[in-house]
Image (spheres, helix red, strand yellow):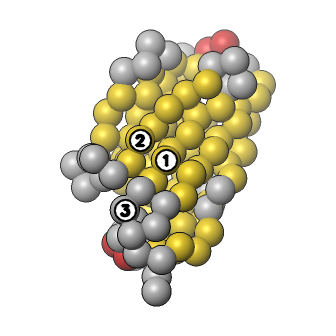
Amino acid sequence: QVQLVESGGGLVQPGGSLRLSCAASGSIFSIRTMGWYRQAPGKQRELVATISNGGSTNYADSVKGRFTISRDNAKNTVYLQMNSLKPEDTAVYYCNARSLAGWYWGQGTQVTVSS
């Protein structure tokens, strides 16, 4: 089992920045890829960004150039730096870990972009 705990969400004005963190514990040796997904009200959960054990990254087109995913393997933590935030980025952001045993999810953290 893998446990994921997110932090760093909140309210920010358009154009502002936030950094999300996700700390993993448990069977972390089994994790291959970590990432962030988001779900806005009335919409399906969508991929935001992923990062592999080797550091390869993948981003949704809507966040390319604005968001950066990174990973500190020594701290078992993945980060999502979000810059130039837009109102359409408002959503609950979920941390995700993919392992040989399956996918794991954090509890989610709310990000609200509003003036």
Q: Mark 3 falls on what kind of element?
A: loop
Query: Could you give the CA–CA distance between mark 3 and mark 1, rounded to whole angstroms?
Result: 10 Å
Q: Residues within 10 Å of mark 1 (few under 14, many from 20)?
A: some
Inspect the image, locate mark 1, and give the three-letter code of the amino acid beneath it: Gln
Query: Could you give the CA–CA distance between mark 3 and mark 2, rounded to whole angstroms?
Result: 12 Å
Q: Mark 2 falls on what kind of element?
A: strand
Q: Mark 1 falls on what kind of element?
A: strand
Above or below 100: residue 20: below
Above or below 49: residue 57: above
Q: Which residue is mark 2?
A: 68
Residue found 49% across the figure and 47% down from its top = 81
Q: Which residue is mark 1?
A: 81
Above or below 56: residue 59: below
Above or below 36: residue 110: below
Q: Residues within 10 Å of mark 2 (few under 14, many from 20)?
A: some
Residue found 76% across the figure and 29% down from its top = 25
Coordinates of residue 115 in the picture (x, y in percent): 46, 86
From the viewer's perspective, tell me whether residue 84 is left or right of residue 76. Answer: left
Coordinates of residue 50 in the picture (x, y in percent): 41, 34
- N-terminal-most mark, 3 or 2: 2
Q: Residues within 10 Å of mark 3 (few under 14, many from 20)?
A: some
Coordinates of residue 57 in the picture (x, y in percent): 36, 28
Contact flag, marks 2 and 1 (Cβ < 8 Å): yes
Farthest residue, direction bottom: 115
Residue 59: quarter of image: top left
Quadrant occupied by the N terminus:
top right
Residue 49: quarter of image: top left
Inspect the image, locate mark 2, and give the three-letter code of the amino acid beneath it: Thr
Q: Which residue is mark 3?
A: 84
Residue found 58% across the figure and 20% down from its top = 31
Coordinates of residue 64 in the picture (x, y in percent): 27, 47
For the question of whether residue 94 can be seen, the reply is: yes
